[in-house]
Image: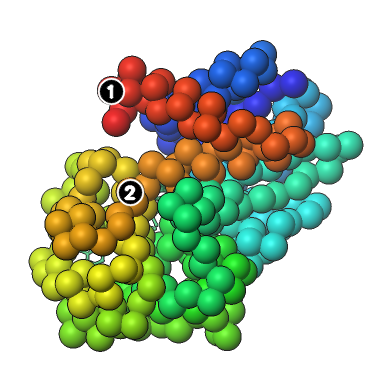
Amino acid sequence: MRLQIIGDPVLHSKSPVIQGAMLRALGLDVPYTPHVVRRGELPQYLAWARENGVAGFNATMPHKEELVPLMDWLDPVAEKCGAVNTICIKDGKYYGYNTDGGGFLRALGDMGVSPAGKRVLLLGAGGAAKAVAAALSEAGAMVTVANRTVEKAAAICQMDPEHLTPAGFEIDTLCKLSENAHILINCTSLGMAGTESRFADLSFVDALSPTAVVCDAIYAPPETALLRRARETGRPAMNGMGMLLHQAILALEHFTGEPLDAEKAKAAALAALKAEGAV
Ligand code: NAP
């Protein structure tokens, strides 16, 4: 058995560190290596992988959407959001999964939060937001997707208009939506290390109910200004590390076909990321 991650670029990806540490911790002697696959090369790669004993692979930019029509089967979240990040090759067939959204749900579960029936304010409408919106709506949450480019929020909401509603990103809009939200999730890149962009106004955090949960998909820095504001105002807060680790665990569960010891896997991956200076 061998596993890979494909993309372009891919050599900067932390997945080999995370997956390598998890595989070792779980006693699985399986190589997991990065493999550059350029845009347009997917059909050749898929054939090569099948012939060369690749049991599964993760996919990053620019392949998550383009893989979808090449799959023999898709899981419900992948089908809903039109993107896969985990592919298993079994009996010559390709099975596509999206574990980003499911990883986020598991991280939420670690905080004791179930999304069913909850009102969620989701900021952003990029790749991360789309996967999270698909998983939350599948789980029965009512989600408002607020984005600077409101057309992108509207496009995401077409996935499931019964559960997803688009909104703009003006501070008055965010404050109003916060008042009714049980969960606030930032899936924009505002506050991410290495970028200059920051939330200019965090008053929408203060507008949340005192018990609302605040989540950020960002894990570097470990505490964004958004999460600091949540913590300082006494609200439960969660950064994106849980999502990052759980999406990897879910992928590994698909690759191996069995549930894994998530706590052991998370601890090993976190230690490896720290040793690399990645967090
Ligand atoms: P993306 O596709 O590039 O989307 C970026 C989003 O940020 C868009 O909604 C964009 O709005 C918004 N944005 C950027 N600059 C903004 C600004 N100045 N004001 C308002 N909105 C702004 O990125 P992505 O892949 O979805 O990633 C988003 C974040 O999630 C990143 O910080 C990434 O690190 C994190 N992430 C975490 C995980 C994890 O496992 N924890 C996984 C994936 C991503 P427009 O549409 O208007 O441009």
* Residue 200 spot, x, y in % from top left: 11, 66
Q: Amino acid at mark 1?
A: Gly
Identify the image quadrant of the C terminus. Answer: top left
Which is more toward the observer, 110 or 27? Answer: 110
Which is more toward the observer, 137 or 160? Answer: 137
Q: Which residue is mark 1?
A: 277
* Residue 25 spot, x, y in % from top left: 56, 18
Q: Amino acid at mark 2?
A: Asn
The residue drawn where x is 17% and y is 72% is: 206
Which is more toward the observer, 8 or 181? Answer: 181
Q: Which residue is mark 2?
A: 239
Does the closest atom of ligand 1 sit within 8 Å of the Cβ of label 2? Answer: yes
Query: For the residue labelled by badge 1, is the local secondary structure a helix, a strand or a loop?
Result: loop
Identify the image quadrant of the N terminus. Answer: top right
* Residue 199 spot, x, y in % from top left: 16, 63
The residue drawn where x is 88% and y is 37% is: 91
Which is more toward the observer, 28 or 9? Answer: 28
Foreground mark, 1 or 2, reads 2
Can see residue 226? no
Q: Earlier in the sequence, mark 1 or mark 2?
A: 2
| Mark 1 → mark 2, Cα distance in angstroms | 18 Å
Colour logic: rainbow
In the shown orientation, is residue 251 left or right of residue 156?
right
Across the whole image, how many numbered discs are drawn on residues? Answer: 2
